[in-house]
Image (tube, grey):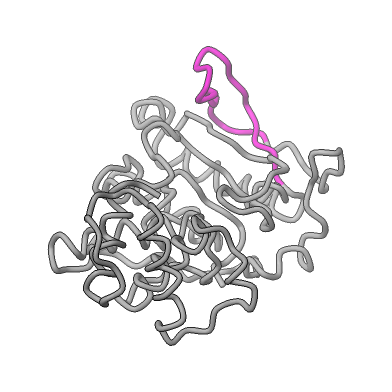
Amino acid sequence: MLTSHIRLLQSRLAALGHYAGSIDGLRGPATDAAIRKALPGFGAPLPGDWTSWTAKRQAVACLQLLARDAGLDPGPIDGWWGPQTDYAANALLHLAATGQKPDWRDIAPGRANPNGWPGESGVTAFYGPHGTPEGHRPPLVKVPSPWTFRIAWNLAQTRSFLWAHEKTADSVARILSRIHLHYGESRLRELRLDIFSGDYDPRLMRGSTTRWSMHAWGIAYDFDDTQNRLHWGADRARLARPEYRPFWDIWEAEGWVSLGRSRNYDWMHVQAARLD
């Protein structure tokens, strides 16, 4: 949570009559007390154990509720700062500054799902158990790439394949072939679509202590993360530019989900799981 988020929280708490301190972006005892007082008054059901949460987690929950009341989707009201909460919090800042919700998408993401990819809540039933740091791996396949990828954290290192869950491997192969056919080798490199930032990775979602990343099943990919940071919206993310629309159209035609085109955050990421 940034200082700007805390200032916004303080100003909203003051408007609700719960806070009389400085709007200084510092979460001290007075801010924490105001948050505890405000939380039950939002009219939304809170998890039964919310009173035992840390002050920081209660602050995040309060910001989630403010975003929800403004018509923004923060995800579950759980007090955890994940990508959806990050998007909603930044959208709330934009709304406070301009009086308008961010208007970032002039096209709707594709709705096709020819491969029948499951929703995020159904990935285990569809794909089986996720991988773990202790060594369990889902059934992975090396899918050859028609172009060579450069590794984002070491551009001198290359690879010529992507790891894919066996259920997505044929789809990934078709997608890579179509992208290569559309752009060609030199254009792919010019657009930095050859910069690979991650596939299979047995880890939790960033910001969560309980939810596993789609990468843990081998059903997600990240591209060019330095130009498409997790919390960046379409105003900053390179992959939101018009020249990348065919790239996303090809993924979406196979039912994959771009978090950027669907939620305007994490523009580097695409996954074979629908948003619940």
What quarter of the picture does the C terminus occupy?
bottom right
Total labels drawn:
0
Please report the bounds of the magenta region as a residue range: 144-164
Residue at x 63% of width, y 39% of height: 199
Q: Position of residue 112 (x, y in %)?
A: 51, 70
- Seen from this angle, which residue lies furthest top? 156
Q: Position of residue 11 (x, y in %)?
A: 23, 64
Residue at x 31% of width, y 62% of height: 9
Q: Between 40 and 105, which is closer to the camera in this rendering?
A: 40
**Magenta segment includes 163:** yes
- Seen from this angle, which residue lies furthest left? 98
Q: Between 111 and 227, which is closer to the camera in this rendering?
A: 227
Q: Where is residue 180 in the image (x, y as percent from the top left)?
A: 48, 37
Residue at x 37% of width, y 50% of height: 246
Q: Quadrant of residue 135?
A: top right
Magenta segment, prevailing SS (helix, strand or loop): strand
Q: In this view, does 93 lie above or below 114?
A: above
Q: Is residue 67 above or below residue 93?
A: below
Answer left or right for 268 relative to 205. left
**Magenta segment includes 20:** no
Residue at x 78% of width, y 43% of height: 140
Q: Between 74 and 248, which is closer to the camera in this rendering?
A: 74
Q: Position of residue 45 (x, y in %)?
A: 53, 84
Q: In this view, does 244 lie above or below 107?
A: above
Q: Between 184 and 131, which is closer to the camera in this rendering?
A: 131
